Image (cartoon, grey):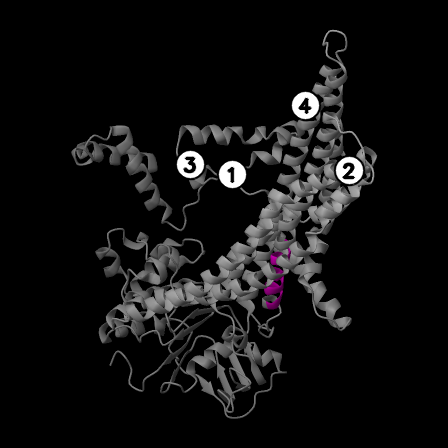
Amino acid sequence: CTQFTLYSYRIVLLNKQYSYGSLTNKKIYNIYYREFSKIIKMDATFKEEIPSNPRSKANIFEIITYRWILKFIKKGLNKELDFIDLYNVLDGDSSDLLGNELKKFWDDELINSKANNREPSFVKTLFKMFGQRFMFSATYLTVFQITLSISISTMVGLIVNHFETNTSFDQNPVGVYLAIGLVSLLLIRAIVYTSISMCSAHLSMQMRVATCDLIYNKALRLKINSLDSTTNGHIINLMSNDVNRFDVSLIYLPFLLIGPLETFVTIYFLWQEVGVSSIIGVIALLIFIPLQVWLASITSNTRLKIANKTDKRVHLMSEIISGLQTIKMYTWEPFFDNLTKQLRKEEMTKIIESSYIKRILTSFFLFNTRIALFFNIFSYVLLGNYITASKVFVVTSYYNILRSSLTLIFPPGISLAAELLVSIKRIEHFLLREEKDKQSVSQTKTANGFEKSNNHSAVPNNNSIDLNDTEQLSNFGIVVSNATAKWSDAQTENTLDNINLIIRPGRLAAIIGPVGAGKSSLIQAILHELPLSQGNISVHGIVAYASQEPWLFAGSIRQNILFGSKMDKDRYKRVIQVCALKTDFEQLTYGDRTIVGERGVSLSGGQRARINLARAIYKQADIYLLDDPLSAVDARVGKHLYEKCIKSIQIFYIVSEIRTKFN
């Protein structure tokens, strides 16, 4: 069917090719193919076939040489790559698997820290999960780094010494063998470094994915009190900037161990070459290390300040975008423009300060080893020794080893490790925020459709309800017994005070009251979003919820209604009809496949409210909680929604006005 439709599209576009100027038919067809593919992908039931990852079936030779990715590179040379060209994720790299595993380690850390009366450590959690692989790769890199570096330097000295003592190539071909050995060592080092870099990148990617999954699930469980001090910008910054420190910093961490070890080994070989003069050169090299450590500590503090400034800026931009229409209506653009510029200026000041410090650390690479080499050779000559070209080459190669370990990689490793610790502490602080209470919810799966109920009454009860009578409770949909709750401990009065309520299955319950009476708070308590200070709430059945403020994500209308559920065409058509969306779909160009935009900006307030209602009604649930669903619709549509939709199912329904919307 898709191929036939594309063929029909091609016939139409060939008749309209005059509007595309000099474009060929093939290019026009590709344009329409991409556009039609976007329309097809708007369907929530559309599933793309992602090719399997060839890395999972690659042999050792293909892994070492990266031959398994050549097919993907050739495809990129021949055509513009799309998301569908990307390979599927490896089973071991899925966020579900990694996140669940890290969650188990983090829960164990919380239990152990509570038992030992200490603060939980996210660093320990990460080390328990990834520490073994990290230590193996670090040890592997340390051994090969020191061995290959010293071997290459020694080989260079042997080659120079050979050509100093032998002027005739035909008499002694040892130089050729030495050159072959040098090239072989360089090739081995390239293969080893590439494999280590790949392993480090893979490990850091897994740490980032697992941490993102942990942060995401934590955000879903945050208590209302915790949300007051946690902004959207803070969470976004954690999942974008802070977790990226794993990718940037992890590859440098082994060199914090390699640097000192390689220094001691190199000093030993320098002593063998130039004696006591090597100590003078190394002292000149090490004298800058305390300064580098001090600058790295300043970088750590600056990184924390930058992260806090970024949190504020991202939060402000999020608020501006959400209220952009109001800002433009009241012409508040200059005020928010200046406010944004001020926050960005403060952030940039700290970023520039951090950049200056990093450039100073980088500058040590340019002069540090040269100064040390000068003092070494100068003191060697002053002590009455005679220098040769081979000796200078060998000493220089040894100092090049020290330059790469102590000045090129070691200082950035210190600063990046400090920044990584700051990011981990920020993530740890977020993970330790208070979560919602895990209250038990009794869910009983029942067959539920759109059968109309003749009895639309709730049973309020001023007396306490015996929750121990399980047999009696199973006949109720919602039971609220002596429920008392408030949003924060700082409140002097309770939001809900000694509420008792019973709603039986198949009945319609409506709560009517003025603004601020606690109607939405009661629904939040039923959903266990509002913690109870005393009392109990029992819910028997699967719950669907439509919020007071319509929430839509950036997808098609159909995707927003289905919300991941399977497509049931009969039920879907009926939901569209009872929610008064059929006329709206006929007016839209792509019908229910229209993209709603960010937060549904392309739709009216009434359309957003009805789509929000349709999503709740489409769900196969036993209890439907609707928070003022008629507030954004007119009287005629409100009457239609009440008569055709609300009265047809078991609903706990609230409105904010004494008068009804449809009468």
Left or right, 257 with respect to 433, comes to: right
**Residue beneath label 3, please?**
81
On screen, residue 444 above or below 407: below
Q: How many marks?
A: 4
Left or right, 245 with respect to 648, comes to: right
In the image, residue 47 lies in the stretch drawn in magenta: no
Secondary structure beneath dot 3 equals loop
Q: Nearer the viewer, residue 146 or 264?
A: 264
**Residue beneath label 2, please?**
382
Give the magenta range. 417-429
Mark nearer the N terminus (1 vs 4): 1
Amino acid under disc 2 = Leu
Mark nearer the N terminus (2 vs 1): 1
Q: In the rendered structure, are the residues bearing label 2 and label 1 in contact, judged by CB atoms less than 8 Å apart? A: no
CA gap, disc 3 and disc 1: 12 Å
CA gap, disc 4 and disc 3: 37 Å
On screen, residue 291 above or below 117: above
Amino acid under disc 3 = Leu
